Image (spheres, helix red, strand yellow):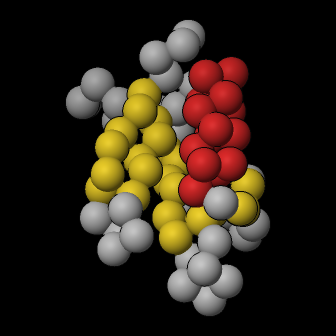
Amino acid sequence: MTEHEDWTRYHIIKTFKSNKWKFYKPGAKRSIKTGTRQEVIKEALYYVCDNGGYLVVHKPDASVDFIVDNWCG
């Protein structure tokens, strides 16, 4: 098992319909936060810090920009 295999994964991606960014857990029906990239990243960092997890932040073209693990807890 890899280091982060059992952690909950979250993603931040740009939506092209509304041209906004969303923070979500794969398989969920709704995003956790939608808004500007700055707003969403801030909320996601607090969320992962409090709840644990593995956050993948994507660039506008959907490639990976950076990854954050539960560095606070």
State which quadrant residue 58 falls in.
bottom left
In this view, 20 is above or below 18: above
At x 58%, y 56%, the residue is: 37
Instruction: Name the residue located 62 percent from the left edge and 89 percent from the top edge.
Output: 17
Q: Position of residue 51 (x, y in %)?
A: 66, 26
- Residue at image position (41%, 47%) is 56
- Give the total number of marks visible in the rendering: 0
Q: Residue furthest top?
A: 73
Q: Position of residue 61 (x, y in %)?
A: 33, 74
Is residue 37 placed above or below 47 in the rendered structure?
below
Position of residue 29 measured from the top left corner of the image (x, y, whole percent): 73, 69
Q: Return the residue nearer the eye: 9 or 67.
A: 67
Q: Quadrant of the C terminus?
A: top right
Is residue 6 visible from the viewing direction of this image?
Answer: no
User: Which residue occupies 47% across, 41% down?
Assistant: 55
Occupied quadrant, residue 68: top left
Q: Is residue 17 visible?
A: yes
In the picture, residue 19 is in which quadrant? Answer: bottom right
57 is higher (above) or lower (below) than 68: below
- Of the 4 image quadrants, the one containing the N terminus is top left
Q: Looking at this view, name the residue that lies furthest to the left.
A: 2
* Residue 65, image x, y percentages: 32, 51
- Horizontal side of residue 1 vs 28, given as left or right: left
